[in-house]
Image (cartoon, rainbow, N blue to C red):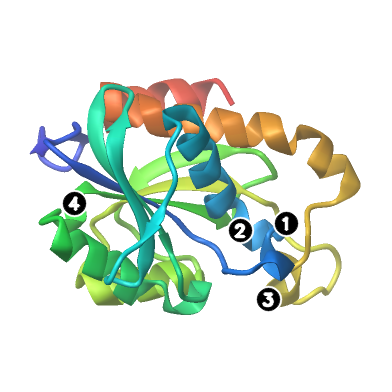
Amino acid sequence: MITGGRTDWVAPEITLVVGLGNPGPGYAGNRHNVGFMVLEELLRRVGGRLTSHKAGADVLETRLAGRRVVLARPRSFMNVSGPAVAGTARFFTIPPTDVVVVHDDLDLEYGVLKLKRGGGEGGHNGLRSVSACLGTRDYLRVRFGIGRPPGRMDPADFVLRDFSAEQRRELDLLVDRCADAVEQLLTQGLAATQNQVHEHP
């Protein structure tokens, strides 16, 4: 449900929370897979496991922070995540405005969290696929900053590399904080969560 025009969102009867990443152990530690990492933390908190769904994602329908949610991880590669996200949303009759996508963001410094609804994809092919398949950009995003690549490194190479040793020392804490932000979004809405998370990085 959207209240106050486009300025706020409060959790509806059921919300779809998707973590973006690439499947397979070879990608598990990549910067591009931080959405999967946050989803795993949410699964740990609810004590649940994902099961294969015909929509092309691994899903769990559960309660998180007292709210009914579907947690989902596309089985497809990042750049073609959209069909699985849209298919899962359709199956559970969840409108795009009640879809929350957790993803890496090159435009934010490492560890910075930002939440928003709508807007562009910033060159993120996973988001581009999701937007195309949902037929709108007007879904919620939880953005996990991974920083810009050093020197002239291609961003496509940067996101497919693991976090640095120094970054990994903080990674668990930051993933935990991002999972907290997802829970807060569900319980307090978008505006209140933005106010707290953006002011207290």
Type of the residue with mark 1: Gly
Report, in whole angstroms, how far the alpha carbon at label 3 lies from the one at label 4: 29 Å
Among the two numbered marks 1 and 3 on one chain, the one whose residue lies closer to the N terminus: 1
Q: According to the image, label 4 marks what residue?
A: 97
| Front residue of 131 and 200 | 131
- Between tags 1 and 4, which lies in front? 1
Type of the residue with mark 3: Ala
Q: According to the image, label 3 marks what residue?
A: 156
Does residue 106 appear anywhere in the picture?
no
Mark 3 element type = helix
Label 2: few (<14), some (14–19) or many (≥20) C-alpha neighbours in 10 Å: many
Report the disc number at residue 29. Answer: 1
Among the two numbered marks 4 and 2 on one chain, the one whose residue lies closer to the N terminus: 2
- Between tags 4 and 2, which lies in front? 2
Type of the residue with mark 2: Asn
Task: Return the x and y of residue 141 as percentages of the image width and height.
Answer: 38, 49
Q: According to the image, label 2 marks what residue?
A: 33
Type of the residue with mark 4: Thr
Q: Are marks 2 and 1 in contact (CB under 8 Å)?
A: yes
Among the two numbered marks 3 and 4 on one chain, the one whose residue lies closer to the N terminus: 4
Task: Return the x and y of residue 177 as percentages of the image width and height.
Answer: 57, 28
Label 3: few (<14), some (14–19) or many (≥20) C-alpha neighbours in 10 Å: few
Q: Is residue 124 above or below residue 43?
A: below
- Residue drawn at the location 57% of the way across and 55% of the way down: 105
| Front residue of 115 and 181 | 181
Task: Return the x and y of residue 179 as percentages of the image width and height.
Answer: 49, 33
Report, in whole angstroms, how far the alpha carbon at label 4 lies from the one at label 2: 23 Å
Mark 2 element type = helix
Report, in whole angstroms, how far the alpha carbon at label 1 lies from the one at label 3: 15 Å
